[in-house]
Amino acid sequence: MANPIKWVNALSTRPSLEAAVAEVVECVLKSLPTPADLGLVFISSAYASEYSRVIPLLKEYLSVPVLIGCGGGGVVGMNAQGEAREIVGEPAISLSLAHLPNVNVHSFHILADQLPDLDSSPDAWVKLIGVSPADQPQFILLADPFSSGVNDLLRGLDFAYPGSIKLGGLASASAIGLQSGLFYFSEQKPNSTTLYREGIVGIALSGNIILETIVAQGCRPIGQIYQVTHGERNIMLELAIEDNKEAKSCDPQPRPPLEVLRDLIQSLSDGDRQLAQHSLFVGIARDEFKQQLNQGDFLIRNMLGVDPRVGAIAIGDRVRPGQRIQFHLRDARTSAEDLELLLKAYRQDPAKSTEVAGALMFSCLGRGEGLYGEPDFDSKMFCHYLSQVQLGGFFCNGEIGPVGDTTFLHGYTSVFGICRTKE
C-alpha cells in the first residue's frame, strides 16, 4: 500500500509535567520517523494547575501543524512495554501522533454562542466549520462539560454532514473543583489561545482516511417494552405496554411509570433487584419504526429522579408521546460481553480491507476499574482483538459517538475511534 497512515502513542506517568512531556515526545518521535500531521494529547487532571503550560511545553519539543487535546480524570495510552494502560486519578499524559498522507486536517474552536439556530440551513453549519460536505469529513470533537452546547452541535453536524463520523468526549476531572481544560494549536492560527475553558475544539479529517466507531453501552434490557403515552420535557408521566403483534399498538390502560417500575423490580431475581438499586437506566429506542427491538437498539439514559405523588420518572433526555422505552441494568459482566461482541464483529468484518493504523478510546469515568474490579479492562480487550494497534484516549464526562445514522452524547459508554487508510 502506497503512503499508509502511521500512528503512534506514548504514555508517561512521571509526576513532573516537564518530565512527562519530554518522555512522551521522545517515545513517539522514535517510533514515527516521518513528519507528524496531527497530535492528540490527553492529560490527567492531576496536572490541572499547570494546564496553561501543556501546549507551550509540547511545542518546545515537537513540531506538528495541528495539536488538540483535553484534560481528563484518567488517560489511556501505551506504556514502554507496548501495553495499553488506563491511568485514573494519578499524573499521566498520553500523546498520539499521526502521519496522514493525502489527508486534510482542518481544526477549529467553537463557542456555544457561535452555534447557528437549529432551524438554520446546512450552509450555516458548513460556514461555521469551514469544510465542504463534498469532502466527506470525519470529526473528532472534544468539549467542555458545562457550556459547550455539544448536543446542538451534534444535531447541526448530522444535519450538514450526513454520513460523516463524529466522535469524541467531554473533558473531565478526577475531583470536584478541578477545572477542565481544552488544548488547541494550529499553525494556520498561530495567535489563537492554546488553553480554553469553554466550547469545543475539534478536527475535520478528509481525504485518504477512514474513521470507524465501536460504541459499547454495556447495558442489558429487563422487562417489557413500553410506549410513553404522556410526557413533558424529560419527565415520563404515563407508560403503556407495547403490543408485540403490532409495534404501534398499546395497552389501553396506561400506568404511572413509577408503578410500572416497582412491579418490574418485584419480578426480578434477588441479584438483579440489588443491581437495580444503583445501576438502573432507561433505554430509548433509537428507531421508532423498527418492529423487533433488541439489545443495542436503545440509547441508554440516566434516571434523574422520581415524583411519588404522581408516579413520574425524570430521565436524562427529552421524552415525547409515542417513544418506546425499556428499563436496563448495567453490570461488569454485561459491559464486558457487549464490548467483546462488538470487537469480534469488527475484526471479522470482511469489508475491512486495510489494516488499522491507530485508535482512540473515549470512556466514561463510571467504567474502568470501578466497574470491572480490575485495571485496564476495556483497553486490554480492545488490544486483544485488534493487536499491535496504538491506542490513546481519556476518561470522559460524556462520550460522543453514533448509533445508527445519528450522533449522540452518551454516558457509561466506551467509544472507540478506529483509523485506517482508505486505499
Image (cartoon, helix red, strand yellow):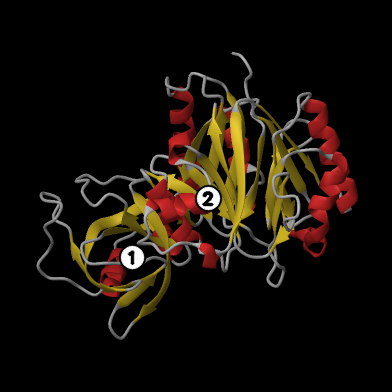
The image position of residue 266, as x and y in percent, is 31, 66
Say if 159 sits above or below 103 in the image.
Answer: below
Q: Nearer the viewer, residue 422 or 169?
A: 422
Task: Give the vertical position of 227 relative to 354 (above or below).
Answer: below
Mark 1 = which residue?
265
- The image's mark for residue 161 is none
Q: Position of residue 322 (x, y in %)?
A: 20, 62
Secondary-structure class at tag 2: helix
Residue drawn at 43 percent across, 24 percent down: 349
SS assignment at label 1: helix
Which amino acid lies under the numbered mark 1 shown in the image of this protein? Answer: Ile
Given residues 403 and 423, the one toward you in this image is 423
Nearest to the observer: residue 270 or residue 181 = 181
2 vs 1, front mark = 2
Task: State the residue position of label 2.
Answer: 129
**Depicted 378 relative to depicted 191: above or below:** above
> Residue 326, position in %: x, y?
30, 58
Label 2, residues with CA under 10 Å away: few <14, some 14-19, many ≥20: some
Would residue 330 appear left or right of 21 to someone viewing this image? left
In this orientation, does residue 407 appear?
no
Residue 70, how many percent across, how many down? 68, 54
Whether residue 249 appears in this view of the structure is yes
Q: Is residue 141 left or right of residue 375?
A: left
Residue 75 relative to residue 131: left or right? right
